[in-house]
Amino acid sequence: MRESTRREGAWQFLTYTFILLGTVVTLVPLYWIFVASTLPESEFLSSTDPRLLPGDAFLSNFQSLQARENVQFVGSIGQMQEYIQLGPVYFAYDFWHLWNPGAIENSVFIAVVYTLLSLLLCSMAGFAFAKYEFRFKKPIFYAILATLILPIQLLVIPLFLLMSQLDMTNTYWAIILPWAANPLGIFLMRQNMKSIPDALLESARMDGATEFQLYYKIALPTMKSSLAALAIILFLFQWNLFLFPLVILEQSKYTIPVAINQLVGAQRVYYDQIMVAATLSVVPIFVLFLFLQKQFVSGILAGSVKE
Amino acid sequence: MAIRETTVTVPASVSDRVRFLRQAVSERLPSASDTTVGYLFLLPAIVLFAVFLAFPIVYTLYLSFFRFQGVGGETLLWIDTQFLSYRLVSIADLQFVGLQNYTAMFSDTLFHQALFNTVFILVVQVPLMVALALLFAVALDASFVRFRGFFRTALALPVSANLVAYSTVFLLMMQDAGLVNYLLTSVGLGPIPWLTSEFWSRMTIVGAVTWRWTGYNMIILLAGLQNIPQQLYEAAEIDGANRIEKFRYVTVPQLRPVLLFVFVTSTIGTFKLFSEPVIINGGGAPLESTITIVQYIYQTAFIDFRLGYASALTYVLIGVVSVLSMIQLRVGGEDGA
């Protein structure tokens, strides 16, 4: 008995050590991003005695990032100070002239519009696949599903050519439209919408609801949590897109990943600025992730475990 | 006559008009018996899908049989952007070359190198990551572990880190005088040439990818674990199975479909590798030891302008990924599941 409890204790100790070690290894690079962004370059790059506690150089690092000419990182938001001095009335009057988005604003705008549009398209398509019968339903669905195994980077060449033909290079739409009908999103929505009882839709039909009303008054409200999960997945997907924006966008429309990459590509690499940029790109997502963690988990699960 | 003149026709109020319009619209809307309803809901998604996904896939196949005739004249317009100093305007000059693009691959040593690197990373990284994810999942599933929510969130957090940002951080940490070597030296292990040796630079990529995706896969496996009926473990216990036997004979077989999903998505993920080698290794350094297939395709297409050849490479990669996925599905599906 004593032998077995001792063994049990050793087992628990091992398990905890493993989990803790993994957690530390996972968190150190993230922690280090934040620390490095608050230190002068010379201090966090020092090989003999790197600092591991936050300093107070965040603002000056941020200012040197803002002062760069080739990449506008934080556009209008960063210059808000000047606008305030100009006066709120002037700001409101001349908003469009003053609106000069940097990478952060570009990224946020693209990701938000993309997420909303994609949620609408995917839920409508999912509703159709789950609740209606029509010809070629199966072949169309499998065609969409098949593209899931395709690495999206491989579409860069034809998409680039297509966008040049449509004269859509260097527009927000070039980044938003191609994956708006997201195959994964359509698949997830179809899986989840199947659980809406047909009787519910039928009784609403008896009450004279149109088919579109069934969609937005019954299907959408019951799908709230899956929609939230899908929203996070779509947002992250768009926030992280790198290769396609790199190819198709020019400086004024750079998203965060492309902009950060510009800081690396220069002759001299400004690590302090990179760290600030990295922090700025990571923090909003962390907050989003922490708040919606549960939905994110169930969202991944819905796509993976269900047949 | 006179009476008629006195009846003033009152113009319909706005709300009446709206009501009337609504009624007219809803009468024209398709009903459930209509087979077109499904199509109507599908239409917007299908249009975008056809234009921006299906068409490019077919168009790539078409392009792969052509050679793109040179740069200059009317065909190209050069615009200097920061990273890429061109912008394509039309692709008028295409010359049909048949299967030439495909046969050229046999003697393309850089392509072989890219293929080798990708397969090397695949063979090392995917099993390592899946094993780690499985161990973390099993550990977090143990009944005595506290603060599960915290550990789960912490381990999954890297998924939300921006690809480019995290790659840059790895570039910094892995330098000869970087944080990792500092830690290694301070515990008595010598510095490792993470970015300058061919072997270790590949391992750096392996490490970075593993760091980012292990937690994600752990969450999926954790859910799979929770779906295993508890009775199976109890039955195994009655038969006198120890912890390892229970893991071997209950957990792994029961998890097979989920493990399969993790393997397939990770394999596809490895073939997609682009940002990590581009940023951490400056696009293949040292000595092309980390150049990946997607990166090679990107270079061929957008730096060398061999669009036809790049398209052919794309199709070969699509073929490889599909075949590998199918093999994994076969192997994973054969016994049980």
Image (cartoon, rainbow, N blue to C red):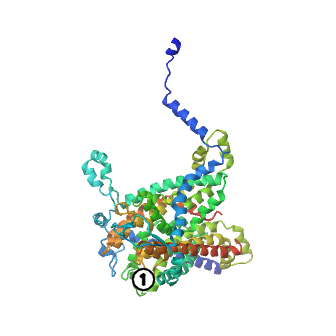
Write down the chain letter for disc 1.
B
Task: Please tell me in which quadrant of the rendered image residue A300 appears.
Answer: bottom right
Please state, as top left, top right, bottom left or bottom right, where the N terminus of chain A lies in the image.
Answer: bottom right
Is residue A222 visible in the rendered image? The answer is no
Q: Nearer the viewer, residue B62 or B167?
A: B62
Report which residue position mark 1 lands on: B194
Can residue A58 be seen here?
A: yes
Q: Nearer the viewer, residue A159 or A267?
A: A159
Residue A280 or residue A246, whichever sits in front: A246
Residue A37 % position (x, y) = 34, 68
Q: Amino acid at mark 1?
A: Trp
Q: In the orientation shown, which residue stands out farthest toward the top?
A: B2
- The kind of secondary structure element at disc 1 is loop
* Vertical order, B45 against A15 (above or below): above
- Give percent across and percent down for residue A135: 67, 54
| A283 versus B250 height, above or below | above
Image location of residue B6, percent across then percent down: 50, 14
Residue at 60% across, 55% down: A126
Where is residue B48? Give x, y as percent: 52, 57
The quadrant of the rendering that contains the C terminus of chain A is bottom right
Q: Residue at x 56, y 61 (%)?
A: A183
Q: Is B224 left or right of A53, judged from the image as shown?
A: right
Q: In the image, is A48 to the left or to the right of B249?
A: left
Few, some or many residues within 10 Å of mark 1 (<14, 14–19, 20+): many
Q: Considering only vertical position in the picture, is A207 above or below A21?
A: above
Asked if residue B9 lies left or right of residue A277, the reply is right
Circle count: 1
Give whichever of A126, A78 is nearer the camera. A126
Residue lying at the far left of the rendered structure: A85
